[in-house]
Amino acid sequence: MRYTLGMDEPAEIIAAAKEVLRISDRGDYTIPAADLYPHQWLWDSCFIAIGIRHYDVERAQKEITSLLRGQWHNGMLPHIIFVSGREHYRDRELYRAELNPNAPDKVSTSGLTQPPMVAEAIVKIGEKLDRAERRSWYKDVYPALLKHHLWLYNERDPHDEGLTLQIHPWETGLDNTPPWIRSLREHKFPLWIKIASSNFLKPLVNLIRRDTRFVRSNERLTNFETLVLYSEQMRIRRKAYDIDKILDDSLFAIEDLTFNSILIRANHNLKKIAKTIDKKLPEKLLASMHKTEAALETLWDEATSQYYSRNFVTHNLIIEPSIAALMPLYAGCITRERAKEIVKLLRDKKSFGAKFPVPSVPLNSDWFDPYRYWQGPVWINTNWLIIKGLERYGFEEEAEHIKLQTLQMIKKSGFYEYFSPLDGSPAGSKTLSWSAALMIDLLS
Ligand code: 9WN
């Protein structure tokens, strides 16, 4: 297949990446992968637009405006907009977003969100437009973007601390990352989860799972993790996505480091957009944005010299290293001293300094597994975020190294979902749209 083998020159790789994106193109939006992810996802479409803008700006704009059609009346951007038709009835049923009066009327969506990458995608598209076009593009999307940021603070920062909280691992985009699975294990689970994830019932659960029909089970979440995430979603659905009710009896409410780092960048981009079109952001929002940057520092742990996510309920840091530790580089608001500490982790061969960087879990973690989803493999979107962060702080050499190794993995195997950090071998879906789109961006 042209898009998996024999790619050498950048032009060939770009052509192959475009082909992957063409296959998953559904008109105004792109699905992440036809096998595993047949709907439109929030941060996927943002990364996809960042790639597509290099050869079709208008289509990249559509990728974003099609996301905005899913916006809830309260401003939330949902993490999935479902395709219609009977085939995917079960996916829509899992959410039943219409239980909440804020759900949109014309499209079916999830009731959760995902990291706020939209502002970055809008600005990156803007870079490809002339001044007048850029202003008109920004004017078109500004009201929805502003509404989304207002929602993030109104609903997800109830104590006005500056950090937003996430109510489900799917909201962080790093589904089974060790800090979440550890936090979820502290939960009391319905007995059926214990029974259903026993070895005895494994064949039955495997039969129901859709993902393992396409990808080897050792590359996906365990049955226990899958069932726990599923049961958390059902609990949130029972509360009809009402945040007060959800927080009333929740142990899983996390101030996620990756999400909040991305929010900080997004805030900068929102300010840029507002300035370009002569809009004044509300004072309260500006104050919250300011607080977020200061609050990020409260996630630093002196004893281990790294940043972590925090449990919203107990206010304790979750001392469980993962790729999130590197994301404050992307936030761009930390001091150079802190940035140097992060780079130390990246260089450390026992930690994140793998032959093929950057593992989603440090190599010396008990959780590390080279092929298991967010518990070890290298993902192209997190590499992209880290590269951008390193460049911002002037660590050009480190950024270039990650870029080159990323290119090697893609050249050898194609646009897979993730790769082993030990030898670069591929895993997951064979054609993940953001792997293709972000490769275009890195090569352009
Ligand atoms: C649940 C689509 C999405 C990504 C996430 C990734 C995975 C979904 C899943 O796929 O999550 O949202 O079914 O596991 O973890 O980051 O946006 O590519």
Image: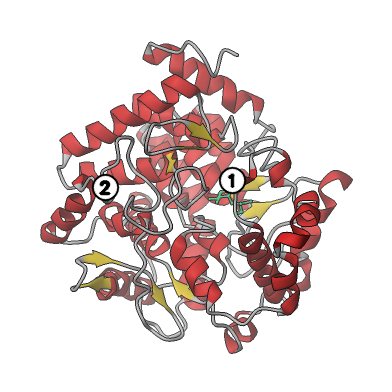
Q: Name the foreground residue: 189 vs 399.
A: 189
Counting labels gives 2
Residue 148 at what x, y percent from top left? 52, 63
State the image coordinates of residue 408 (x, y, percent, origin top left): 36, 24
Dividing the picture into quarters, in which one does residue 14 lie? top left
| Badge 2: residue crowd in 10 Å (few <14, some 14–19, many ≥20) | many
Q: Is residue 329 left or right of residue 245?
A: left
Residue 106 visible, this orientation: no
Say if 198 sits above or below 416 in the image.
Answer: below
Of label 1 and label 2, which has the lower sequence position?
1
Q: Classify 235 as above or below 79.
A: below
Q: Secondary structure at mark 2?
A: helix
Which residue is labeled 2 in the image? 389
Q: Give the amino acid at mark 2.
A: Gly
Quarter occupied by the C terminus: top left
Residue shown at 43% from the left, 48% from the top: 376
**Most distant residue in the bottom direction:** 248
Residue extending farthest to the front is 200
What residue is shown at x 16% (from left), y 61% (from top)?
A: 338
x then y, percent, for residue 428 = 57, 38
Residue 66 seen in this snapshot:
yes
The percent position of residue 364, horizontal first and vertical second, equals: 31, 54
Q: Quadrant of residue 175?
A: bottom right
Say which mark, if any, is on residue 218.
Answer: 1
Q: Which quadrant of the rendered structure holds the N terminus?
A: top right
Along the horizontal axis of the image, is 62 left or right of 401? right
